[in-house]
Image (tube, rainbow, N blue to C red):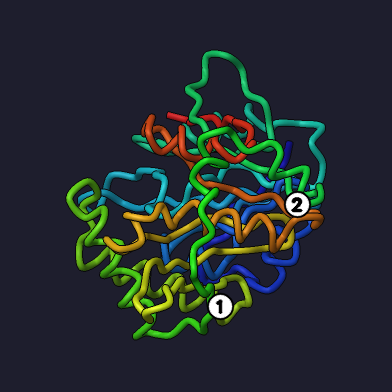
Amino acid sequence: VNYKIIKNSEINKADWDLHIDQCFNAKVFAKSWFLDIVSPNWKACIVGDNEAFIPITAHLKFGFIPVWYQPLLCQQLGVFAKSSSNNYLTLLQKIKRNFFRANIHLNDGFLYPKNIEKRANYVLDLNHNYDTLRANYKKDARKNLKKPLPITIVEESIDVAQMNEVIEIYKSQYGDKQNISKKLAETIKKLMLTAAKNNAAEAYSIINSEGNILFKGVILKDAKRIYYSFAAPTDLGRAVNITHYFIDYLIKKYAGSTLLLDFEGSSIPSVAQFYAKWGSEIKAFGVLK
């Protein structure tokens, strides 16, 4: 397979995004605006006559050691192709030889050989009516939704103040388990604000009848998926299992569409168990090392 690698300053970003949208396995992580934030000097590998595209998120470690790494906040990359007839593994192995070290998450569009490490992702096909989707929830999810709560779910615009609030709530709930540095928080903020400018994000708040915030979150979206990206309950929200109500709301909102709800993970057993509650299925993706 012939291919060419184009340095960042020479990539036609609008063209790249159009091609990614045409790929059967398109993901928001491969959009130029997403890559520009998480891996500012990424290069574009164009395969054949625009048949496939590989974002190369490489950098020089210590200024001289070439490494190809998986950027933070970017669950899956690898090959994005117009057709699923070739998994391009041989090509990936060939490109990988240019680097001292490589650790790249491929995407779930292709099945890879058994000897390649796999990670689990949970995905729910929303192309059914809400009642059918709800009937597939596990017993535990239905039990948590039994009690009707006097809540209001508000879709809000994404701006700096709103993102600061989402990040603070997230850190208060998960900060001890996930080291969210100042730099990472800034990257998350920039990413979500840029996604909003590209019509690729939605932000939500859940408020109780006293006007207290129970939950805040931002989801990413593209033509094929909505991504459960960055969300957290407050202490008040956690006490009433509010995250269940939010996911149920999302499923109801997008039921009957051709979209997939992508939970973006997880290898943490308790989180995986939560994502499995909604009738979602495991979509494994490979890791190239």
Q: CA distance from mark 2 to mark 1?
A: 20 Å
* Residue placed under numbered mark 2 in the picture: 130
Quadrant of image for the N terminus: top right
Q: Local crowd at mark 1 within 10 Å, few (<14), some, or many (≥20)?
A: some
Q: Nearer the viewer, residue 226 or 184?
A: 226
Task: Give the mark nearer the N terminus: 2 vs 1.
Answer: 2
* Residue placed under numbered mark 1 in the picture: 155
**Image location (x, y in percent) of residue 121:** 54, 37
| Residue in the picture at 62% in, 60% down | 250
**Image location (x, y in percent) of residue 185:** 28, 67
Q: Residue furthest left?
A: 176
| Residue in the picture at 20% in, 67% down | 182
- Residue type at mark 1 is Glu
For label 1, the SS is strand
Q: How many marks?
A: 2
- Residue type at mark 2 is Tyr
Q: Nearer the viewer, residue 125 or 1?
A: 125
| Residue in the picture at 69% in, 52% down | 26
